[in-house]
Image (cartoon, rainbow, N blue to C red):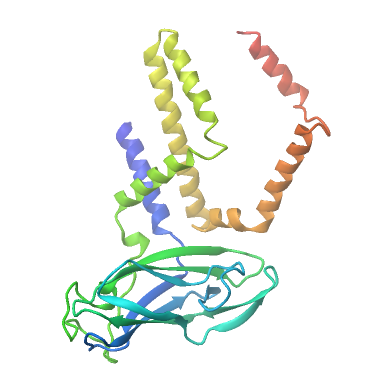
Amino acid sequence: MKKLLFLAFILGATLVQAQILRPNEWSFSLSTAEYKVGDEIDLIFKATIDKGWHLYSSDFDPELGPMVTELVFEDNNSFETVGDLQAINPKKGYDDIFEGDYTYFQEKGEFRQTIKVLAEALNFNGSINYQVCTDDTGDGRCIPFEDDFSQSSFGLKAAVKKKIDSPANESGQQAASFDKPEDKSLWGFILFAFATGLIALLTPCVFPMIPMTVTFFLKENENGDSSSAVKKAIIFGVSIVLIFTIIGTLTAMLFGADTLNNLATHWVPNIFVFLIFFIFALSFLGLFEITLPSVFVNKMDQQSDRG
């Protein structure tokens, strides 16, 4: 039974992972395949954006609201950046919600970062942070990403000399693509999900329930039936895992991997949840009283009489 439960969990995680929504892909190249210490070269980032989506650029006010595209490099003595990240011919738009101008790319996009080579063994690591959104104003989906890159993404080895020892394309530039999430280790994905689940225990709506849950099982143990307490605790934990795994997997398979993201970001479900909390808050403050139907109250009273 335990093996079947474990296999079901693995299958569910695999199916969800295989359908990760990724509307944007990157490729990399260098402005020149030959360089020496003291030269300035461009790191070129080219984006391929799915139809119906747009990628926010890097050259508008980051305080406006939308997430601008930016590069973050780890400290390294083999190079230094020259100037800011440059967006190549982005489109311009006006956001009615944030009331400001922004720039973006559709279908294709290009960014360039100039660096100065300080050592023959040029190597670097960093990440590109960006946000893609749907063009459908009624949909309202926006997804932030943080993708890692390194010198190997541009065809550079850990140690290079004046000329790059890797195959070049027709323009003499090197190209590579980001590792997609679906290409990464399944166990890494499971461990990441487990770690984020532990972090979620600290949220205000979950953390107060921990003492109540633990007290319930400790009470069972104090009554002298430790095996029953352990059994119920295992059933409780496994049930939570199965419920979320099954619901998440079925939702992704039947309605698409972005369905839950739509529920979290679309204005309709958010307004609905807001109204529920608002009504309960008014009741909590004494404006009116919310009572259960009498049929449920009577059934609960009958159960309470049983001890």
Horizontal side of 4 relative to 298 (left or right) equals left
Residue at 53% from the left image edge and 24% from the top image edge: 212
Horizontal side of 71 relative to 142 (left or right) equals left
Q: Residue furthest bottom?
A: 171
Numbered disc total: 0
Which quadrant would the N terminus be assigned to in this image?
Answer: top left
**x and y percent of residue 304 in the render?**
65, 12
Horizontal side of 158 relative to 88 (left or right) equals left
Horizontal side of 213 relative to 168 (left or right) equals right
**x and y percent of residue 62 in the render?**
56, 70
Q: Between residues 36 and 291, which one lies in front from this camera angle?
A: 36
Q: Between residues 88 and 114, which one lies in front from this camera angle?
A: 114
> Which quarter of the picture shows residue 205?
top right
Q: Is residue 102 above or below residue 247?
A: below
**x and y percent of residue 64 in the render?**
62, 70
Residue at 29% from the left image edge and 92% from the top image edge: 171
Which quadrant would the C terminus be assigned to in this image?
Answer: top right
> Which quarter of the picture shows residue 194?
top left
Q: Is residue 153 above or below residue 161?
A: above
**x and y percent of residue 14 in the render?**
36, 52
Q: Is residue 234 above or below residue 67?
A: above
Residue at 74% from the left image edge and 22% from the top image edge: 295
Q: Is residue 215 above or below residue 255?
A: above
Q: Between residues 3 and 195, which one lies in front from this camera angle?
A: 195
Q: Residue furthest right?
A: 287
